[in-house]
Image: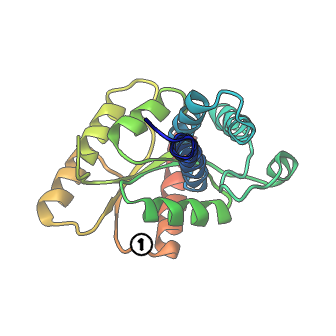
Amino acid sequence: MQTLDTTVGDVLTDFNFHRARIEHYLLRAEECIQMARYKTAQKAVEKVFSLEPENRAGKSLQKRIDYILATLTRNGSSDVGGDGSSEQTWKRQKRHALVMVVDQDERILYALTESLSKHGFDVVAAGGYDEAIEILSIMNPQLILSEVNFANGPMGFDLYLWIRTNARLQGIPFLYLATRVDRETLIAGKRLGVDDFIVKPLDEGIVIASILNCLSREKKMRS
């Protein structure tokens, strides 16, 4: 027969494990917001609510994510760099195009989200093909910056081809990020119509210049 102390100890262990799971998902949601992975942040908050439906921190995060997603969906002006700024600050700051970044390396997503936000761009990010498709079902970015090869799942070329066969999205400028660009990859990309390749490790100045140049070309073509 279990002693009272043992029973209480088991209850406390279960409680601590429960709280640890909640804290884990809250932290994960914050991390995803920092790197502009708002749909993934939303799913982390849903995990929190599955464990504690009335969690106050989760509700606060959900409100924040909903606001950002609604703003980006209508292509409004918001600072989405994940620095915790107020909505009033977001609305006051002048913004440019919405750029979507797709890369499996979260360090790159953090860095690019910070860099692009600093230079006045709205940013939304994805960690792979499926997440990118989910975002593109509700948003119209003005430019996409994507990894060429993902460790798991479809390659960046699959994402590019999916976009080019989608009537709503097919005109979006598309830039590739690559650790190295061999001759075959470069030829394939050029034949498909990829706008440019940016080689890693990324240089902030080159990334921003490439984006601005690409958007400028697109604007001239439309006019």
The spot of residue 186 in percent (x, y) is 20, 60
Tell me which residue sits at (85%, 53%) in the image: 89
Tell me which residue sits at (26%, 51%) in the image: 150
Taking the image as shown, residue 203 lies to the left or right of residue 34, namely: left
Report the front residue among 89 and 28.
Answer: 28
Please say whether residue 151 is visible from this viewpoint: yes
Of all residues, the one furthest to the left in this rendering is 184
Up-down: is 154 above or below 92? above
For the C terminus, give its image quadrant: top right
For the N terminus, give its image quadrant: top left
Please say whether residue 140 is visible from this viewpoint: no
The spot of residue 137 in percent (x, y) is 47, 26
Tell me which residue sits at (52%, 68%) in the image: 209
Taking the image as shown, residue 164 lies to the left or right of residue 168, namely: left
The spot of residue 25 in percent (x, y) is 54, 45
Quarter of the rendering containing residue 55: top right
Report the front residue among 210 and 147.
Answer: 147
What amino acid is found at the position of numbered circle 1 in the picture? Answer: Leu
Up-down: is 102 above or below 53? below
Q: State the residue position of label 1.
A: 202
Quarter of the rendering containing residue 141: top right
The spot of residue 95 in percent (x, y) is 72, 52
Up-down: is 175 above or below 207? above
Tell me which residue sits at (65%, 27%) in the image: 53
Report the front residue among 185 and 35.
Answer: 35
- Identify the secondary structure beneath mark 1: loop
